[in-house]
Amino acid sequence: MRIVIAALLLLLLPGAALADSAFDGKWKMHPDSVKVTGKANQFQVLEGMYTCSSWQPEINVKADGTDQKS
């Protein structure tokens, strides 16, 4: 009996894997529902330095891929 159940599960699994998910389809955004407050964030990578001038205190660190003190 266990072999029959296992065989049925193995036959059904590929169909379940190919099924559409809840996230498939067209997504529509309603711009009138978006609320924007405050100033926009300003990020910049220039000459090996990462700068975020919109944060307080302002962030200036080397953009070399290593951990930096902020």
Image: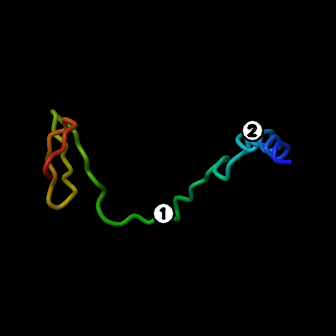
47 sits left or right of 26 in the view: left
Determine the residue positioned at 29% across, 61% down: 39
The residue where tag 1 is placed is 34
State the image coordinates of residue 53 (x, y, percent, origin top left).
19, 53
59 sits left or right of 20 in the view: left
- Distance from disc 2 to disc 1, alpha carbons, whole Å, reads 40 Å
State the image coordinates of residue 38 (x, y, percent, origin top left).
31, 65
Disc 2 element: helix
Single out the mark in the foreground, 2 or 1: 2
Seen in the picture, residue 58 relative to 2 is either above or below; the reply is below
Determine the residue positioned at 22% across, 37% down: 65
Quarter location, residue 29: bottom right
Q: Looking at this view, is 58 or 21 the one in front?
A: 21
The residue where tag 2 is placed is 14
53 sits left or right of 14 in the view: left
Mark 1 closeness class: few <14, some 14–19, many ≥20 residues within 10 Å = few
Q: Looking at this view, is 37 or 9 the one in front?
A: 9
Seen in the picture, residue 33 relative to 60 is either above or below; the reply is below
Question: What's under tag 2, amino acid-wise?
Answer: Pro
Quarter location, residue 55: bottom left
Disc 1 element: loop
Mark 2 or mark 1: whose residue is earlier in sequence: 2
Question: Is the C-beta separation of discs 2 and 1 under 8 Å?
Answer: no
Determine the residue positioned at 40% across, 64% down: 36
